[in-house]
Each structure stands twice: as C-alpha cells, then as structure tokens.
Image (cartoon, rainbow, N blue to C red):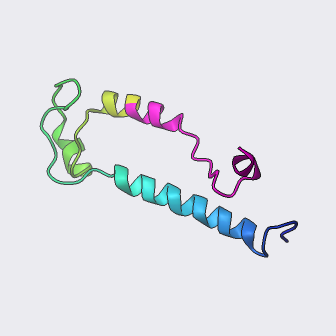
C-alpha cells in the first residue's frame, strides 16, 4: 500500500529494482575467459583444481578472499526510491 505521493506498487518496484541491481553487479563480477596459472595480484600459482572449478579465475584464494571482504562493505542500498535521497 503506497501512501502520499507514491503510486500503488511503488514499494515492490523498489524491491525489484534493488534485486535487479544486485544480480547485475554479481554477473559483472563473474570471471570470464581463460583462467590464469598465477594470481594477477600476488603472483602465487593458482591450483589446477581451482582453475577447473572456476573458469576464468584470475586470483588465488587468499587474494579473492580479501577482495570479497572489501566488496562486502558495499551497502547496495537502493537510494533511487528513498525519500531521504530526494530531500538532498
């Protein structure tokens, strides 16, 4: 139920938009192409089992874990429909 200036279904549209953004972001982060034999960050060898399991892998497990930690700090909050963002 929308209220004020929001049209009916606005909440659902915002939820779907947030989910679509998250899916697109995740797809962009998927590795593509041929796997590297050595990590492009630290130069350590990437095990063959990892290269087979993750086609297109470019980082060793340790470097990938660090990258994942940094990226998890990203909130992903959709501010497009937020009243706060409209007031600024």
Where on the picture, by quarter, is residue 12? Answer: bottom right
Q: In this view, does 14 lie to the left or right of 6?
A: left
Q: What stretch is highlighted in magenta?
A: 67-88
Using the image, determine if residue 13 lies above or below residue 47. below
**Residue 86 drawn at (x, y percent):** 71, 51
**Residue 48 drawn at (x, y percent):** 16, 41
Q: How many labels does the image show?
A: 0
x 59%, y 58%: residue: 18
Judge by depth and name the residue closer to the eye, 64 or 49. Answer: 64
Using the image, determine if residue 30 lies above or below residue 41. below
**Residue 63 drawn at (x, y percent):** 32, 29
x 62%, y 52%: residue: 78
Task: Name the residue at the bottom extreme.
Answer: 8
Using the image, determine if residue 71 lies above or below residue 87. above
Q: In this view, does 84 lie to the left or right of 26?
A: right
Quarter of the figure with the C terminus: top right
Where on the picture, by quarter, is residue 36? Answer: top left
Taking the magenta stretch, the answer to whether it contains residue 76 is: yes
Task: Name the residue at the front extreme.
Answer: 88
Using the image, determine if residue 73 lies above or below residue 14. above
x 51%, y 55%: residue: 22
Q: Is residue 84 left or right of residue 23?
A: right
Quarter of the figure with the N terminus: bottom right
Q: Is residue 64 left or right of residue 34?
A: right
């Amino acid at each position: 139920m929308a209220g004020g200036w929001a049209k009916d279904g606005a909440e659902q549209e915002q939820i779907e938009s947030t989910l679509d953004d998250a899916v697109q972001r995740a797809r962009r982060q998927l590795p593509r192409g041929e796997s590297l034999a050595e990590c492009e960050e630290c130069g350590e060898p990437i095990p063959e089992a990892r290269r087979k399991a993750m086609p297109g892998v470019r980082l060793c497990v340790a470097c990938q874990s660090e990258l994942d930690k940094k990226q998890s700090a990203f909130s992903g909050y959709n501010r497009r429909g937020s009243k706060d963002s409209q007031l600024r």
